[in-house]
Image: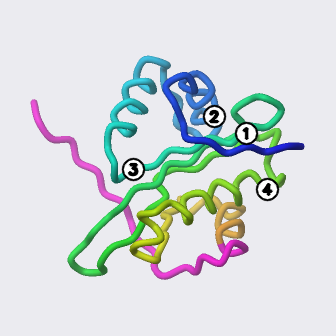
Amino acid sequence: MNIVLRPMTLADTDAVCLLTGQLGYPSDTSAMQQRIAAVLDHPDHCLYVAMADERVAGWIHGFYSLTLESGSFVAIAGLVVDERYRRSGIGSALVQAVADWPEARRCGRVRVRCNAVRGETHRFYRALGFREVKEQKVFDRAVGAS
């Protein structure tokens, strides 16, 4: 199988939408297209897709983050590989694309947060050299109109 990585484009919206649903975050095409366009418009973000068998078989989103307490790093905001292509090297290649992104090279660190229930994903990241540094809870609050 030949795997080709390339930057994501708006033309990938339908495929990205389907893959995101596999990750457990269903989205309609219009909303996904708006999100992709917004991320593509930010130079501190990168989006890549992996092509296999002439189809989008995975995607990754990375972004540059600067915090007072721990300095700069590139965060993996999302990564998904089509169920049919898992364990084929696509996920590793996508993570490496983010690690090779110039912003990651500049700050020298890539970080990822992963749902506590995704044991296989934890093993995947450990196998790529990531180490667990803390556990945390995520809190969410709506803002704006009440």
Q: At which x and y percent is residue 37? A: 38, 30
Which comes sooner in the sequence, label 1 or label 2?
2
Residue 71 drawn above or below residue 61: below
For badge 4, the amino acid type reads Gly
Residue receiving disc 2: 19
Q: What kind of residue is marked 1? A: Asp
Mark nearest the camera among 2 and 4 is 4
Q: Which image quarter holds the C terminus?
A: top left
| Circles 4, 1 touching at the beta carbon (< 8 Å) | no
Residue placed under numbered mark 4 in the picture:
89
Q: Secondary structure at mark 4?
A: loop
**Which residue is under mark 1?**
82
Q: What element does badge 3 sit on?
A: strand
Compared across the picture, whether 30 is left or right of 89 comes to left
Three-letter code for the amino acid on which mark 2 is drawn = Leu
Q: Residue at x 37, y 25 (%)?
A: 34
- Which span is picked out in magenta? 126-146
Q: Mark 2 and mark 1 in contact (Cβ < 8 Å)? A: yes
Position in image of residue 10 (x %, y %): 49, 25
Mark earlier in primary sequence (3, 1): 3
Q: What x and y, as percent, mark residue 92?
A: 71, 60
Q: Nearer the viewer, mark 3 or mark 1?
A: 3
Q: Nearer the viewer, mark 4 or mark 1?
A: 4
User: Is tag 3's residue or tag 4's residue first in the polypeptide sequence?
Assistant: 3
On the picture, is 36 further left or further right than 16?
A: left
- Residue 72's disc is none
In the rendered image, the quadrant that contains the N terminus is: top right
Q: Quadrant of residue 93?
A: bottom right
Q: Which residue is mark 3?
A: 45
Residue furthest to the left: 145
As for residue 127 lying within the magenta part, the answer is yes
Q: CA distance from mark 3 to mark 4?
A: 23 Å
